[in-house]
Amino acid sequence: MNSLFLRTEKRVILRKTLRLFSLTFLALSGVYVQAQQEEVSSTALLNMPIGVSTISHEIYNLHMLIFWICVVIGVGVFGAMLWAMYFHRKSIGHEAENWHEHLGVELVWTIVPIFILVAMAWPATKTLIDLYDTSDAEIDIRVTGMQWKWQYEYLGEGVQYLSELSTSLDEIYNIEPKGEFYLQEVNNHLVIPVDTKVRFLLTGADVIHSFWVPDFAIKKDAIPGYITETWVEVTQTGVYRGECTELCGQGHAFMPVVVNVVEKDEYQFWLAEKKQEALDIAALTQVTFTMEELVERGEEAYLRSCAACHQANGQGIPPAFPALAGSAIVTGPVEAHLEIGVNGVAGTVMQAFGPLLSELDLAAILTYQRNAWGNDMGDVVQPIDVYNYIQAQ
Amino acid sequence: MAHGPAKGITRWLFTTNHKDIGTLYLWFSFAMFILGGFFAMVIRAELFEPGMQLVRPEFFNQMTTMHGLVMVFGAIMPSFVGLANWMIPLMIGAPDMALPRMNNLSFWILPPAFLMLASTLFMEGGGPNFGWTFYAPLSTTYAPDSVNFFIFAIHIMGASSIMGSINIVATVLNMRAPGMTMMKMPLFVWTWLITAFLLIAVMPVLAGAVTMMLMDINFGTAFFDAAGGGDPVLFQHIFWFFGHPEVYIIILPAFGVISEIIPTFSRKPLFGYASMVYATSAIAFLSFIVWAHHMFLVGIPISGQLYFMYATMLIAVPTGVKVFNWVSTMFRGSISYETPMLFAIAFIVLFTLGGFTGLMLSIAPSDVQYHDTYFVVAHFHYVMVAGAVFSMSAAVYYWLPKWSGRMYSEAMGKLHFWVSFIGFNITFFPQHFLGLAGMPRRYADYALQFADWNMVSSIGAFIYGASQILFLYNVVATIVAGKKVSEPKTWDGANGLEWTLPTPPPYHTFTTPPDLRDLHDHQLTDDQMEEHPGSATH
């Protein structure tokens, strides 16, 4: 009587559990479908993007193949286990058997997995060979990772520029509402043409960074002293967003990669424009600016290139990042200030900005620093001063 | 001659007793587990929502670094050393560890090492902020000044591990009771023996890596500085030559624990004992020749890439054998679900999931998409937490009645299990999604599309964190006020020399070794179990 009652009760519990599971499953799949339709809810993000490059499709398919093989094995193993857990319980009076060895099955489950692994290794090897084939690239772009931004140089074109986070500190520190592309937006996009094999040559200027665009399925470390390479051929125009994936210091989460993939003629047009821009900026080196103009430009450039360490209020984060407000160098002779701005400080995080910024931006930043936060030096640094300083070295 | 423990604090400071030292290790590792868990809570609280709310990115990096270091070197490794100290002599019928004074030393240098490491958080410039893998040059040229204390702490931890391992090897090879040949040892002893060899092999490599860092930072060498003719990638090779065996150092003793618990509660001998030993040895061997799968993106040539991919995939074979053996042990057993068994079953399921993601990660071309994302974080927490930590919880519930002579509350134990199990999965399962969707690891802040799963993961982490308070409560409540038990065998299905001893065991056990010359395999017969060979004590 008692055991019968227990049986029924257990069956009820089992049925209830099953219903709970199926409800959860339905709810989850509902969320998933809905999210897919709306394309906004982030719970839709469950899997790797299929991506828009030739290699990304290959990698996605490989990923799904291995995933399903694992699922099948998992169902087998966990199925056997659940079977034993349910039917071979002590509480239903199951008696233990005593066997504990069987050479046959042990050989089978040692050898069969090897064949499964070979089945996995075959397509993996094929994909890896494609991934490593950087030959016949039409465009070479050197990507330099540095704390905490990327520099892109179109080799042989004379075009190079920095790409820095354009999300404001106010958004990061929750003072302003966060924009749609929070932490995934930059001032200057990397631009490449569609349907063209582009090779990236990566290096690091300070520590190791890693360059990743999920939709392209390219990720490679940018290591100081090394040049690593990878390639992509994108099949769809659009804006694609990626990030740095190797811990590189406090700004690690704040150096995204944004790539514009454009039509081929649009790319040529953009490239020509970029070349002209470089010439224009160089021409501005000859122009003399007023303090207001320099301070205005300088503040903007400072927030972009310097504030991550020295902070927007110039207080820095001592000891690693000294304060600039009231600093002996900033409020001292211009030469010493120029020296650090242009050449950096060896062995520290302070980079040599001479090769990174235009003379105009560097002059503007120095002028801003000398006159902001109560420094009030009242003097200006003109682009030509920076130019002359660099030439004199 | 006194045979009981000394009185007061000197009992613990000067003890050479394997049980006391085991207890010290276990409590120390639990303290570190709480500390490392606290760091994890800071991380998950900051990641609860996009934007920086609680800490600055710089401090966030210190938290991820210290979380990893404290959990790996302070919590997991010492906890298994503690278990080894307690159990190996009891399991092989030895009176104590072979080198008891060194045993004392290897424990007592640990607390100062971690005190020093933790103190760096209060130093000017902050503590280590370069990740637990401390890649150069972030950890050399760009490191905070406190890095020297970090290096010294690592040296001390390494010395402690090496001494502990030598002790275990010496004990297992020399102090087994007559008749207990190698292939009759309990599997926990086997896995620890192999682990100890791994430790002796790789801890000096880690010491070498940090010493080179020390030289680079303070004495002008350039081992890892490309500008001086050095090589930042060299650091990674050296680190992972230590680091990959290290993950097996963490998981092999866990395999041993599970291989003790599953047969007990299945009331059926462990399936495929010999193949378990061979599989463990195979895993240990493979662990030395796969290190560069952590470096698939540094630009090693394709031939190297292929080799490391194939070799890594091979690990699935012996690991699969172990899982199949555990399931076969359960199959047609007579299974009951006490707390240790629940943790052990959860271990098998979740560790296997971690193994599947490990297999996925071994596929070099797909690794391009997984590398350094939350997919990896999910993967290694499935093997480290659901692997090592769950097995440790299982071990504590399994042997605590034997150690303390008191029984824990089964209801409370099960509550701890279910809260941990659910909390763990809520924390780490969504991290697979986050990683695949493109969220890199060690990010102090993230883009908006990752917000939902991060919040779910953080909620899970708080649940899992809270469940450890239950664990602490259960252990303390058992020791202080648990129901007294005195049966040698706590569990009816248990087998092994430790269950022949009185409960709780006297301060000195097996002062006369049990005679096991009629032992015919790794199982003791019923007669042998009833002889109580270890109860003989002065």
Image: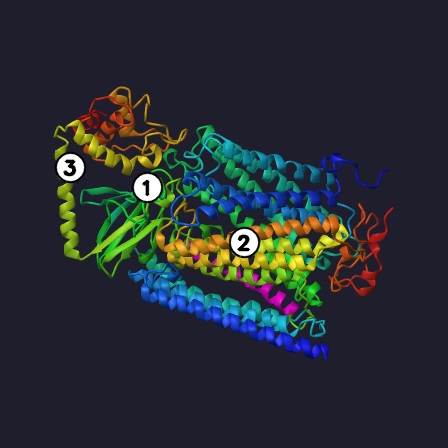
Identify which amino acid the numbered label 1 is placed on: Asp
Give whichever of B527, B473 is nearer the camera: B473
Q: Is mark 3 on a helix, strand or loop?
A: helix
Q: Is mark 1 on a helix, strand or loop?
A: helix
Q: In this view, does A315 lie above or below A134?
A: above
The dot on residue A281 is 3
Q: In this view, does A289 lie above or below B175?
A: above
Residue A254 drawn in magenta = no
Q: How far apart are marks 2 and 1 (CA)?
A: 32 Å
Query: Which circle's residue, 3 or 1, is located before the other in the chain?
Result: 1
Q: Is residue B203 above or below residue A344?
A: below
Q: CB atoms at circles 3 and 1 under 8 Å apart?
A: no
Residue furthest to the top in view is A333
Left or right, A369 with reference to B48:
left
Which residue is under mark 2? B463
* Residue range highlighted in magenta: B305-330
Give whichever of B249, B489 is nearer the camera: B489
Left or right, A242 with reference to B142:
left
Identify which amino acid the numbered label 2 is placed on: Ile
Marks 2 and 3: which is nearer the front?
2
Marks 3 and 1: which is nearer the front?
1
Identify which amino acid the numbered label 3 is placed on: Ile
Question: Which residue is depicted at the point 13% across and 28% down?
Answer: A288
